[in-house]
Amino acid sequence: MSLQEKLEALKHETLAKIEETKELAGLNQIRVETLGKKGPITEVLRGMKDLSAEERPKVGSFANEIRDIITKEIEAKKELLEQLALQKALEDETIDVTLPGKPMKQGTRHVLTQIIEEIEDIFVGMGYEVVEGFEVEQDHYNFERMNLPKDHPARDMQDTFYISDEILIRTHTSPVQARTMEKHDFSKGALRMISPGKVFRRDTDDATHSHQFHQIEGLVIDKNVTMADLKGTLEEVMQKMFGADRKIRLRPSYFPFTEPSVEVDVSCFKCGGEGCSVCKHTGWIEILGAGMVHPNVLKMSGIDPEVYSGFAFGLGPDRIAMLRYGVNDIRNFYLNDLRFISQFKGE
Ligand code: FA5
């Protein structure tokens, strides 16, 4: 077989292979095998040195022609295969927008968070600052600075989880009072703050007591603050929370950190004061503890009780949530039972 015949046969064989191949990888292999350095065309071109001067240019240009034809065919096939691959990928990724969607369940904020945020909004609207305290607290701030020295019998009112002799998990949010008072710069004006958070007591859990619950502390210190300010402020807050017709009443009470101390009742929002199961037929609901800040507490925070006075209060959002939604067991708030929690959708 002459060189030309060999080249002609090679062309037919290669074009048939190109035609047949369906993969880019296979096409590349054909290119390497046919046109590569060890391929048959290179071999033919190498063998030209043995040809006569007359034949050499003819065979040379024929070999080049065949190489060009094969190269073009490979390029064309490559483009075709690439297009087919793209088309297939597009088909595979097609999204059927008419398929029904999967419904997503929307979560809600916990009912206690909702109540706390609602109370925060009311106080912020009245010019109060929201302050964070520590859940792990020193005995010093939780008790001593609240006028409850180590041997004070009123410590029994709040059974305490101690971590060491000096460290505990706070039994109320009142330590935030002391921490805020000692930092406040009164030359810049009055101190008005609330502080919401978790508190802990070694109470036995029952329907109305939990070893972990929430409180919102409130504190106002300025010149000439009186009991009337306390009453007016709390009445306004209760009306914003429970309706414009609400009234409050103060009953004498005892807290070591306030003098005088009061227990605050709000007229029943369910029956309007006539008596029902929510207010245990008294017409009133006990809602928080409060009082005028004890002079000892002011002194211990570096504030002169002859110049400044103030009021403080502590309310329990868990109890408020129970009253408002008719929840008869406080433990429901802490069980993470979605059947219970998801009833409170919030706004
Ligand atoms: C106090 O803790 C005072 N620090 C409140 C205070 C602050 C008075 C500032 C004066 C001035 P008391 O122990 O009464 O007070 O608790 C306050 C509120 O927390 C109660 O009215 C009640 O709503 C709630 N509370 C108390 N113990 C529990 C409990 N085990 N579970 C749920 N809520 C409770």
Image (cartoon, grey):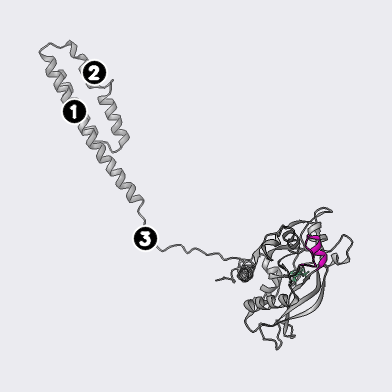
Determine if the magenta segment contains residue 301: yes
Residue 298 in view, yes or no: yes
Q: Is residue 143 above or below residue 73?
A: below
Q: CA distance from mark 2 to mark 1?
A: 16 Å
The tag on residue 43 is: 2
Residue 151 % position (x, y): 89, 61
User: Marks 3 and 1: in contact by CB < 8 Å?
Assistant: no
Q: Amino acid at mark 3?
A: Val
Q: Is residue 17 above or below residue 289?
A: above
Local crowd at mark 1 within 10 Å, few (<14), some, or many (≥20)?
Answer: few
Which residues, given as a range, are shown in magenta?
294-307
Looking at the rendering, in which quadrant would you find the N terminus? Answer: top left
Q: What is the quadrant of residue 21 in the picture?
A: top left
User: Marks 1 and 2: in contact by CB < 8 Å?
Assistant: no
Local crowd at mark 2 within 10 Å, few (<14), some, or many (≥20)?
Answer: few
Compare residues 334 and 268 and report the one nearer the observer. 268
Determine if the magenta segment contains residue 174: no
Identify the residue position indicated by label 3 in the image. 97
Q: CA distance from mark 1 to mark 3?
A: 48 Å
Who's the residue at 18% across and 28% down the image?
Answer: 68
The tag on residue 285 is: none
Residue 86 % position (x, y): 31, 45
Q: Amino acid at mark 1?
A: Asp
Ligand 1: quadrant of the figure: bottom right
The tag on residue 68 is: 1
